[in-house]
Amino acid sequence: MKVQLIKLKDMASDLGVTRNTVKKWIESRGLPCHVIDSRYYFRPEKVRQWLDQQEEETEKNGDYYVRN
């Protein structure tokens, strides 16, 4: 079985945020990742599930916050 892993810089680019923001999400919001030799890797399907969960929680709580 072949598993696709995305590097930190590519995940940040795909999400439209900085690498530091992705690291903060890992620490504070539980963004799923794998750390191999001090490098961060992501499974796109797990990140999609996490994003969907974050969206559901935001809608449920009515916590809409947009920051520029």
Image (spheres, rainbow, N blue to C red):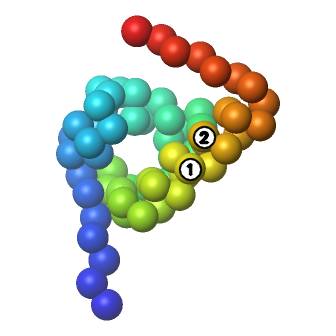
Q: Which quadrant is home to the N terminus?
A: bottom left
Q: Looking at the picture, does residue 37 appear above or below residue 54? A: below
Q: Amino acid at mark 2?
A: Glu
| Relative image position of residue 42 (x, y in whole percent) | 36, 57
Q: Quadrant of residue 45?
A: bottom left
On the rendered structure, is 54 left or right of 2?
right
Report which residue position mark 2 lands on.
Answer: 55
**For the residues marked 2 and 1, what is the alpha-carbon distance in whole angstroms?**
5 Å
In the orientation shown, which residue stands out farthest toward the top?
68
- Disc 2 and disc 1 in contact, CB within 8 angstroms: yes
Report which residue position mark 1 lands on.
Answer: 52
Q: How many marks?
A: 2
Secondary structure found at label 1? helix
Please give the name of the residue rendered at 24% of the width and 52% of the height, measured from the top-left corner: 7
Label at residue 29: none
| Relative image position of residue 31 (x, y in whole percent) | 51, 46
Q: Looking at the picture, does residue 51 appear above or below residue 66? A: below
